[in-house]
């Protein structure tokens, strides 16, 4: 039963992750007083992109073509590892949190390489910013995962999230609050959301992620957009696991609670993007350092 629920989680994530983007867009539209696009607009956009062909520059190599495919494959592996609250990961094993960090890093690495392969100055600028900010975001993520591992004395993500609130909630609450704040900041940074980046902007001088995919089109751009929605689901699941302590003995109920929590988090992200302005690029490192500080405090609190 547990394996079937884990498989169902993966299938639902593969199906519903574009809807997650639609919820964020609709929330922002409501705050702006607009009707906004349909909740299912992302599905229409992906279908349109997958029906198109791709145009490749003569200056690019196989790296440019492999980037989107490797990115989707990497984030699907991450999705199979990450648990959702009380739902265990489909491909769980001791130490899988290290593999999670590596596959997410591989996704970014291939995106950056594909951007540099074009020889475009704008894409090179976006790749430089992506690498700079990832240098600060990845330590926060690893420290946060280390804090959960130390707290539960486990090395597998599924075991960690299943036993995180097994002790007294009052004892775990300070660590969970610190980690929830850290995961929220990392979620916004890793998914190029406001206040770190604006996924709707078209100004090359201010873009980070979007400028790296300017030369992609058709099915390649479809893979990239789909991978972005899956990555958003992965980081939301990591946040939900520490922010919402609801666990039951019924796997299906855990799955329903987890999916509802994911979409509630999407609404929260939409509210953040509607009520905050984008930070200046020089301020973004300070935000990411704050995430690392929260993770360090969480580790020290667990080791006290």
Image (tube, helix red, strand yellow):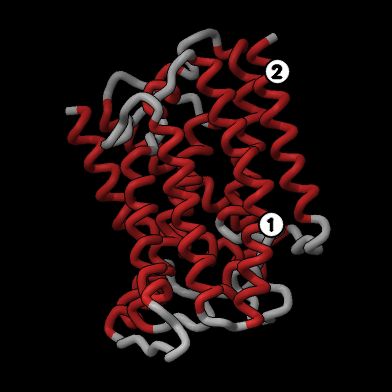
Earlier in the chain: of badge 2 and badge 1, it is 1
Residue that mark 2 sits on = 300
Q: CA distance from mark 2 to mark 1?
A: 26 Å
Residue 63, placed above or below residue 263:
below
In the image, what residue occupies the spot 49% across and 75% down? 37
**Residue name at image x 76 percent, y 40 percent:** 290
Count up the numbered dots. 2
Residue sitting at x 58%, y 38%: 141
Give the camera-side residue of 234 and 38: 234
- At 43% across and 60% down in the image, what residue appears? 229
Q: Secondary structure at mark 2?
A: helix
Pinpoint residue 158: horizontal percent, then vertical percent: 37, 27
* 295 up-or-down from 57: above or below: above
Residue 251 sits above or below residue 236 on the image? above
**Residue 233 visible in the shown view:** yes
Q: Quadrant of the N terminus?
A: top left
- Which callout, 2 or 1, points to the residue nearer the camera? 1
Residue that carries the numbered disc 1 in the rendered image: 132
């Amino acid at each position: 039963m547990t394996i079937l629920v884990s498989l169902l989680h993966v299938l639902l994530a593969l199906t519903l992750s574009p809807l997650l983007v639609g919820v964020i867009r609709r929330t922002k539209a409501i705050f702006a007083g607009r009707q906004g696009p349909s909740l299912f607009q992302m599905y229409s956009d992906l279908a349109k992109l997958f029906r198109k062909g791709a145009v490749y520059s003569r200056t690019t190599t196989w790296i440019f073509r492999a980037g989107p495919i490797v990115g989707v494959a990497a984030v699907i592996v991450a999705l199979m590892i990450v648990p959702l609250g009380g739902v265990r990961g489909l491909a769980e094993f001791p130490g899988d949190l290290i593999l999670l960090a590596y596959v997410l890093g591989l996704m970014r690495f291939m995106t950056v390489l594909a951007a540099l392969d074009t020889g475009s100055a704008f894409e090179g600028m976006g790749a430089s910013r992506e690498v700079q900010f990832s240098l600060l975001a990845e330590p926060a993520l690893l420290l946060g995962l280390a804090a959960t591992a130390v707290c539960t004395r486990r090395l597998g993500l599924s075991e960690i999230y299943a036993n995180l609130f097994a002790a007294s909630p009052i004892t775990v609450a300070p660590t969970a609050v610190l980690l929830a704040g850290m995961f929220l900041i990392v979620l916004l940074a890793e998914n190029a959301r406001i206040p770190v980046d604006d996924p709707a902007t078209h100004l090359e001088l201010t873009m980070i992620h979007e400028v790296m995919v300017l030369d992609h089109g058709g099915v390649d751009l479809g893979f990239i957009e789909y991978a972005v929605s899956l990555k958003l689901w992965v980081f939301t699941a990591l946040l939900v696991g520490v922010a919402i302590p609801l666990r039951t003995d019924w796997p299906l109920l855990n799955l329903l609670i987890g999916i509802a929590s994911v979409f509630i988090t999407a609404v929260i992200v939409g509210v953040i993007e509607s009520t905050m302005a984008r930070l200046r690029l020089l301020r973004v490192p300070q935000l990411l350092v704050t995430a690392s500080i929260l993770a360090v405090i969480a580790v020290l609190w667990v080791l006290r």
